[in-house]
Image (spheres, rainbow, N blue to C red):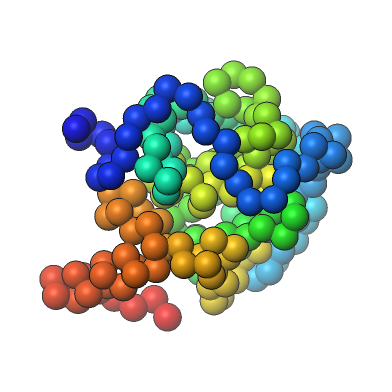
């Protein structure tokens, strides 16, 4: 197994389409908006044109699905999360971000995780507009976590002081979702906490 492939993963040349619910084909670049809200001093609702007017970045990275497939060398373009974080003027007490999506889907991650330089609010993949089946017109791109954290059909970023586990997380999937730790399910999160405690690495975040 290549050192770049996380444990339990199998490389695919295709791109499986997996999600709960139906594809919201009615959501287009013309109708899409993104709401920045919560513990922020500059709440806003951005249009797709607004998104394109912000600094853009391309990232090449592997993606890893919790269902065990990995796709190598994918190329994504969008706005770095850090740009939107700064645009919203996030307050010091905010530590988590809930990603609100079409059809009521949510997921969340700590702001520190999303502030990684590889994280994008993405609208383009492999040089083409992101297809609806893959979360277009806009989705999160968080390549260092299992791909359900790269929320499809993104509609809002809520900055919060306390976490709110999302759609898959309340159904037993890991809230950490780290492919290299193979935290696929909630039980894996507990196992990792125990490992860190034994190694004196665990620092509760509240």
Q: Is residue 98 above or below residue 73?
A: below
Q: Residue furthest bottom?
A: 206
Lateral position of residue 82 relative to residue 72, left or right:
right
Residue 117, x across and y down, in percent: 44, 42
- The reply to whether residue 84 is in sight is no
Query: Camera-side residue: 114 or 198?
Result: 198
* Quadrant of the image containing the N terminus: top left
- The reply to whether residue 179 is in sight is yes
Residue 123, x across and y down, in percent: 65, 33
Query: What's the residue at 21%, 31% (across, down)?
Result: 2
Q: Is residue 12 above or below residue 36?
A: above
Query: Camera-side residue: 8 or 189?
Result: 8
Q: Quadrant of residue 184?
A: bottom left
* Quadrant of the image containing the C terminus: bottom left
Residue 57, x across and y down, in percent: 54, 31
Q: Is residue 143 above or below residue 165?
A: above
Residue 11, x across and y down, in percent: 34, 30
Q: Quadrant of residue 29?
A: top right
Q: Residue furthest top?
A: 127
Query: What's the residue at 39%, 68% (across, down)?
Result: 186
Query: Camera-side residue: 72 or 90?
Result: 72
Query: What's the residue at 66%, 34% (across, down)?
Result: 133
Query: What's the residue at 79%, 46% (across, down)?
Result: 33
Lateral position of residue 196 relative to residue 36, left or right:
left
Lateral position of residue 185 relative to residue 95, left or right:
left
Q: How many marks?
A: 0
């Amino acid at each position: 197994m290549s050192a770049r492939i996380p444990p339990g993963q199998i490389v695919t040349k295709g791109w499986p389409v997996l999600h709960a619910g139906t594809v919201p084909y009615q959501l287009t670049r013309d109708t899409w908006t993104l709401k920045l809200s919560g513990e922020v001093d500059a709440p806003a609702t951005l249009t797709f044109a607004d998104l394109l007017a912000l600094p853009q970045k391309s990232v090449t990275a592997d993606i890893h699905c919790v269902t065990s497939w990995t796709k190598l060398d994918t190329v994504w373009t969008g706005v770095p999360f850090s740009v939107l974080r700064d645009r919203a003027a996030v307050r010091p007490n905010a530590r988590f971000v809930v990603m609100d999506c079409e059809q009521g889907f949510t997921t969340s991650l700590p702001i520190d995780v999303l502030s990684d330089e590889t994280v994008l609010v993405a609208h383009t993949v492999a040089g083409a507009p992101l297809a609806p089946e893959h979360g277009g017109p806009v989705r999160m791109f968080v390549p260092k976590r299992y791909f359900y954290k790269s929320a499809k059909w993104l509609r809002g970023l809520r900055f919060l002081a306390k976490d709110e586990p999302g759609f898959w997380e309340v159904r037993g999937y890991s809230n950490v979702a780290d492919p290299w730790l193979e935290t696929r399910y909630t039980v894996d999160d507990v196992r990792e906490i125990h490992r860190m405690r034994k190694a004196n690495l665990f620092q509760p975040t509240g």
